[in-house]
Amino acid sequence: SCVVPVVGATTQEKIEAAQSEKAETESDLAATQERIQSLESQKAELEQYLQDLDSQYNTLTQNIEDLTVKAGEKSEELKKVQKELKEAKAKEKEQYESMKLRIAYMYENGQNSLFDILCQSTSFADFLNRADFAREIQTKDRQMLEEYQATKAEVEELMDQLEQEKTDMEALEAEYEEQKASMEATLA
């Protein structure tokens, strides 16, 4: 009779130990499953984050390509405006020199007044011819002056346009550098 309680107590202890171990294992299993779910959630978040970064990288790459194209176009526009400005300045100088020669000629030859020229006419036909000639000279002088003024205005406009193109080019370069820095940060 003494042997039976000891055997029963040992088996009972084994059952309780096994049940305790089972409960502990089930608890560990539940904790492990929670950990797996947590890791899978983190994995999904990281995959989404990587997709977002990839999208940002692609967008930045496209922006940089667009800025490079725009910079090339602006560079071409800048060259074109510089060429037009050079041509306009040459034209302005040529017109200015022509006007100087005309004024010097008029001054050196002591051109008589219109009234004196008309009074020297010998006939009415000569009077009309001289009046028409004087009108043509005056018209040509006025036309030369207007062309010179227009060319001078064109030079000023082209200089303003050149400055604007340079400003636009600098803005594009700054934006390009900003996008490049952003892309490098994203890559890092």
Image (tube, helix red, strand yellow):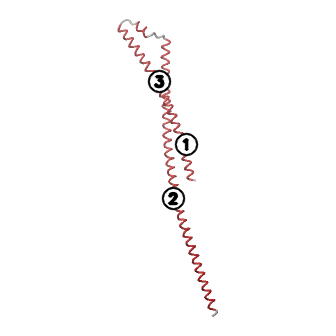
Residue 123 is situated, as x and y percent measured from the top left of the image, at 36, 6
SS state under label 3: helix
Residue 154 is situated, as x and y percent measured from the top left of the image, at 47, 28
Q: Is residue 3 above or below residue 25?
A: below
Given the image, on which type of amino acid does mark 1 rest? Ala
Measure the alpha-carbon separation of dots 3 and 2.
65 Å
The residue under label 1 is: 174
**Which residue is drawn at the image coordinates 35% and 7% (left, top)?**
124
The residue under label 2 is: 48
Given the image, on which type of amino acid does mark 2 rest? Gln
Which mark is drawn over residue 37? none
Measure the alpha-carbon separation of dots 2 and 1.
31 Å
Between marks 2 and 1 in the image, the one whose residue lies nearer the viewer: 2
The residue under label 3 is: 149
Between marks 3 and 2 in the image, the one whose residue lies nearer the viewer: 2
Q: Is residue 51 above or below residue 96?
A: below
Q: Pointer 1: residues within 10 angstroms few (<14), some, or many (20+)?
A: few
- Residue that protrudes farthest toward the bottom in the picture: 1
Q: Is residue 24 left or right of residue 136?
A: right
Residue 163 is situated, as x and y percent measured from the top left of the image, at 52, 34
Name the image quarter holding residue 34.
bottom right
Q: Earlier in the sequence, mark 2 or mark 1?
A: 2
